[in-house]
Amino acid sequence: MDQAARNRGTAQPEAVPGEITILGLHKAYESRKSRFEALRDIRLTVGGNEFLTILGPSGCGKSTLLRIVAGLEDASSGTVLLDGEEVIGPGADRGMVFQGYTLFPWLTVRENIEYGLKLRGVPILDRRGVSSYLLRVIKLEAFDKAYPKQLSGGMKQRVAIARALANRPKVLLMDEPFGALDAQTKLEMQEMLLDVWEKEKTTVLFITHDIDEAIFLSQRIVVMGAGPGRILKEFQVRLPAERTPEVRERPEFLALKRELAQLLKH
Amino acid sequence: MHPPKRRKPPRFQIYKDIGNKPYAITAGLSFVFLLAVWSLLSYTEAVNPVFLPQPQRVLMELIRQLGSAEYWNHIGISVFRVSAGFALACLIGIPIGILAGTFKFGEALVEPPMEFIRYMPAVAFIPLIMVWAGIGEWAKILLIFIGCFFQLVLMVADNTRRVSQDLLHASFTLGAGRWKAIETVIIPAIQPQLMNTMRLILGWAWTYLVVAELVAVSSGLGFAIMKAQRFLNTEQIFVGIIVIGLLGLISDRIFAFLNRRLFPWA
Ligand SMILES: Nc1ncnc2c1ncn2[C@@H]1O[C@H](COP(=O)(O)OP(=O)(O)O)[C@@H](O)[C@H]1O
Ligand SMILES: [Mg+2]
């Protein structure tokens, strides 16, 4: 490509970074005897800074899809692009929060948050700055020297989110991160997550089977069905950007909830 | 008035802690019980005193032996042999075990032959070792090494395979490559289990020591036992066994203490 063409390319309105494009993705698990089709022809674009939730019943392939986007697993065919570049293998540009607790038990809360920065050789003073800021965001300043075993489930997931964000990833992948928490903690965590998303400006690809959670958090919801795992339908969430607990009582919320419940029943 | 009904303090709850004091008392009682059975059998001469000496005579013998420089020499040389053989096995066995547990290639390379060798009794190697290493210090150390090494590699590989996949995946999504994941996840994660494995293997090292010292030696606790046997001096045999037991106990306690001090997070 010559210089002029490249300049023309950049002269176009710049897309917000952190855009995921999933093209014709298939995934089959094959063993000697059988072949199980986990994902069929998934096409999806998640815009930069968008909060998109994939909603679907257990076993429909949500985790498989997310692991492929994270690069932890290979697709059978199809590609995943991040800002136009093909994703090959896992990387710090796609942070992930898992359903199970995955904090490193031998590191303190602060050391867990700084893990990715330390890998990249960020000097200690800069690391301290980032971790102190994130500790404040997740409201766990008082626990910086605690070990994970001393934390409750909700606290652990808050640290896991902070640990992923410390790398300033373009995308945050979240696989039912609040699935194991009690109802009250779950609500608090959802509000905290929106707060963090507001501050950090990253793309969030969130997975859940909880309809309320999906509506409350997202700008857009993609519903998946099982057998084989595929995309059924897509919904724009027409709720105010500011999500206070009262949003849950709005007629739009309840209407969408009814529609999603209907769709998931089949 | 009736006193309020209380549940009986639970004593036989599955897995439940019973507190330090009841634990110590129970442990003490079980020693007392052993001693009581021993006393009963020996003081009533139900068993010929040549075979089972009286506790108080063994105690006298123990005090006499611990007062002699010669016996301390035996202890010293035995401790040296155990430490050398054990340390050598750890130095070579632990890295090999970690690689065998981490990479399937390593597993294929290392484990099948070791599974095979480990069923060969170390004692059967004695004649071979004498051919290889003569009857000097190295021969004893080599026997202890052989007794520990193969078992250690297999157990360390197993410890390594038990590291949670999720922790590894978390490190990948935080930017770790393969070698960094081994360094920052696998190695710290296995440490507490590794200490337990080493503790177990050290117990075996003491067993092999006695075997090693039964042939062609003129020093060490095993030799002292053999010499006592020649004179049918059962008191001295008992002393030898008790001293080895105590040394094993001390090394075991040191490991347990280190485990608690080094890994407060576990
Ligand atoms: N490694 C694997 N081998 C074979 N089948 C798998 C594997 N991983 C997942 N599956 C199957 O793929 C389907 C989708 O799994 P998953 O992505 O975990 O679903 P979800 O996260 O939506 O509950 C399930 O039926 C599961 O049994
Ligand atoms: Mg899942």
Image: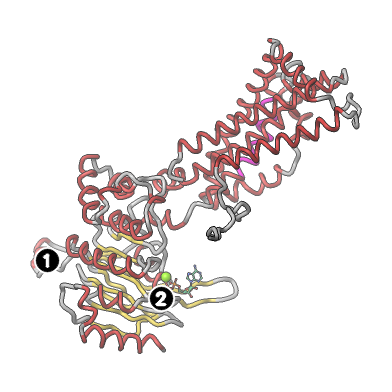
Name the foreground residue: B73 vs B67.
Answer: B67
Residue B43 in percent (x, y) is at 86, 27
Which quadrant of the view contains residue A210?
Answer: bottom left
Q: Residue furthest front?
A: B1
Q: In this image, B18 relative to A58: left or right?
A: right
> Magenta includes B87?
no
Label annotation for residue A26: 2
Q: At x 66% / y 44%, what residue is drawn?
A: B114
Q: At x 36% / y 50%, what residue is drawn?
A: B176
The amino acid sitting under disc 1 is Ala
> Magenta includes B149?
yes
Residue labelled 2 has its Cβ within 8 Å of some atom of ligand 1: no
Quadrant containing ligand 2 reads bottom left
Label annotation for residue A5: 1
Name the foreground residue: B234 vs B103.
Answer: B234
Label annotation for residue A188: none
Name the foreground residue: B251 vs A60.
Answer: B251
Residue B225 in percent (x, y) is at 79, 22
Residue B63 versus residue A222 in the image, above or below: above
Residue labelled 1 has its Cβ within 8 Å of some atom of ligand 1: no
Q: Residue furthest top?
A: B69
Q: Which residues are magenta?
A: B140-154
Q: In this image, A254 relative to A99: left or right?
A: left
Marks 1/2 in contact by CB < 8 Å: the verdict is no
